[in-house]
Image: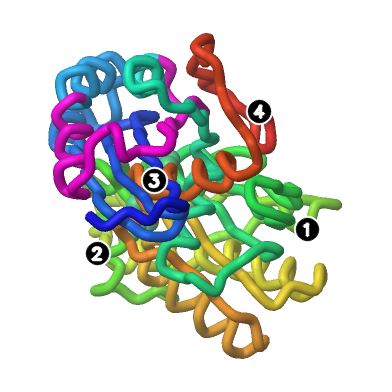
């Protein structure tokens, strides 16, 4: 690896949920390595992430994942400028593994430590493949635990204009998938099954939150789907799973796209990005692309591999935090409910 003197190389670590990930990122935008050890297969048998099992697996994997990230990038710890790590939000035991590891490496290698907000990481995934993208822009963040509509005012600076009142979008996907027997994680399974279904086969409710036009609510939709399934079971009616999940997905996509596009228009931004695991949903990406084209808005989205949890996005976010002077001490702790914009 050729390293220019002024290059900033971040060794990034992510362990907030069920992926143990490490990456080396140059100057916030260039991926030198991207290693992800997914625990999905392990948690599938339980129908969701088991926090205790996740923590243990992170401990088992983290050293080899980091070693591989450095090797793949062709660098040693000496070449690294700073160590970036997700310190919240997420599962506390899972986060702690990454935070403890990052502190140990940064201390031993005498490098600065930069703690990163997981959601700031998701947003920053957009910088990797879009060298032209700079704040300000509107971003829809849709993951397993979060549904936020934000204005990215500057790197790492957010104004939250909408959020979910109940379930996160990814959570709704996971719960509906489980109810129809598609298994965990629900999002990708529904995405695939919905391709064979008719999105207009069933009419599910699109909830609006009174007085909060940018807020989301998915629990009513989820209940309507569950009621539909129960009713069908009681009457012995056969359920067409592709039609059901396509109709559910269509309702979620409509809610997300309409609010995100309305926000870009009404707040006067020409750039709209999406982030988080659900941002890899093919129907959401297609609908967003179409709506943005219609409205003359430039649409940005990371490749699917950078939408779901990874450490490259943490390296991108850590770079901009590093430039701003963010440094954390050896007392950095995991903060499971860290709020966006908090340091
Ligand atoms: O961002 P992420 O990997 O982890 C969190 O920070 O939560 O998001 C995981 C969520 C899960 O709920 C998963 O079902 C959902 O993202 N997801 C999807 C798709 N891929 C992952 N949802 C819809 N369509 C997909 N293709
Ligand atoms: Zn995530």
Which residues make up the magenta segment?
63-92
The residue positioned 28% from the left and 18% from the top of the image is 55
Residue 9, label in figure: 3
How far across and down, in percent of the image, does residue 247 sit?
A: 42, 67
Q: Is mark 4 on a helix, strand or loop?
A: loop
Residue annotated with mark 4? 343
Give the residue number, with chain letter if any, for mark 1: 213
**Disc 4 + disc 2, Cβ < 8 Å:** no
Q: Quadrant of ligand 2?
A: top left
Q: Is residue 323 above or below residue 270?
A: above
Q: Do the residues labelled 4 and 3 touch (CB within 8 Å)?
A: no
Question: Is residue 226 covered in magenta?
Answer: no
- Is label 3 or label 1 in front? 3
Residue 233 at x, y = what percent? 29, 46
From the top left corner, tell me how far across and down residue 294 is, in percent: 62, 90
Residue at 80%, 74% in the rendered image: 268
Q: Which residue is drawn at 24% across and 32% down?
A: 47
Mark 2–mark 3 distance (CA, rounded to whole Å): 41 Å
**Residues at marks 4 and 3, CA–CA distance in whole angstroms:** 22 Å
Report the side of 120 relative to 58 (left or right).
right
Tell which circle, 4 or 3, labels the residue nearer the N-terminal end. 3
Looking at the image, which is closer to me, 305 or 277? 305
């Amino acid at each position: 690896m050729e390293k220019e003197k002024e290059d900033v190389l971040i060794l990034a670590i992510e362990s907030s949920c069920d992926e143990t990930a490490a990456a080396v990122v140059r100057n916030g935008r260039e991926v030198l390595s991207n290693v992800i050890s997914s625990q999905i297969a392990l948690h599938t048998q339980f129908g969701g992430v088991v926090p205790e099992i996740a923590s243990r697996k992170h401990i088992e994997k983290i050293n080899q994942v980091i070693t591989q990230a450095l090797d793949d990038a062709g660098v040693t710890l000496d070449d690294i400028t700073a160590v970036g790590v997700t310190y919240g939000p997420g599962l506390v035991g899972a986060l702690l593994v990454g935070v403890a590891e990052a502190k140990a490496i940064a201390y031993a290698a005498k490098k600065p430590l930069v703690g990163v907000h997981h959601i700031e990481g998701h947003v920053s995934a957009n910088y990797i493949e879009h060298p032209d993208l700079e704040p300000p822009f509107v971003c829809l963040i849709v993951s397993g635990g979060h549904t936020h509509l934000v204005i990215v005012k500057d790197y790492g600076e957010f104004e939250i204009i909408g959020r979910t009142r109940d379930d996160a979008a990814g959570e709704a996907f996971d719960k509906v998938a489980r109810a129809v027997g598609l298994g965990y994680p629900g999002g990708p399974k529904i995405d695939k099954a919905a391709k064979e279904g008719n999105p207009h086969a069933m009419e599910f409710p699109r909830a609006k939150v009174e007085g909060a036009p940018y807020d989301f609510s998915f629990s009513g939709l989820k209940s309507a789907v569950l009621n539909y399934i129960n009713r069908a079971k009681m009457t012995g009616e056969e359920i067409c799973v592709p039609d059901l999940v396509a109709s559910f997905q269509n309702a979620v996509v409509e809610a997300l796209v309409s609010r995100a596009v309305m926000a870009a228009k009404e707040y006067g931004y020409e750039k709209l990005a999406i982030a988080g695991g659900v941002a890899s949903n093919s129907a959401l990406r297609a609908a967003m692309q179409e709506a943005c084209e219609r409205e003359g808005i430039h649409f940005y989205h990371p490749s699917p591999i950078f939408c779901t949890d990874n450490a490259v996005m943490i390296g991108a976010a850590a770079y901009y935090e590093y430039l701003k002077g963010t440094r954390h001490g050896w007392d950095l702790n995991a903060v499971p409910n860290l709020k966006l914009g908090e340091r």
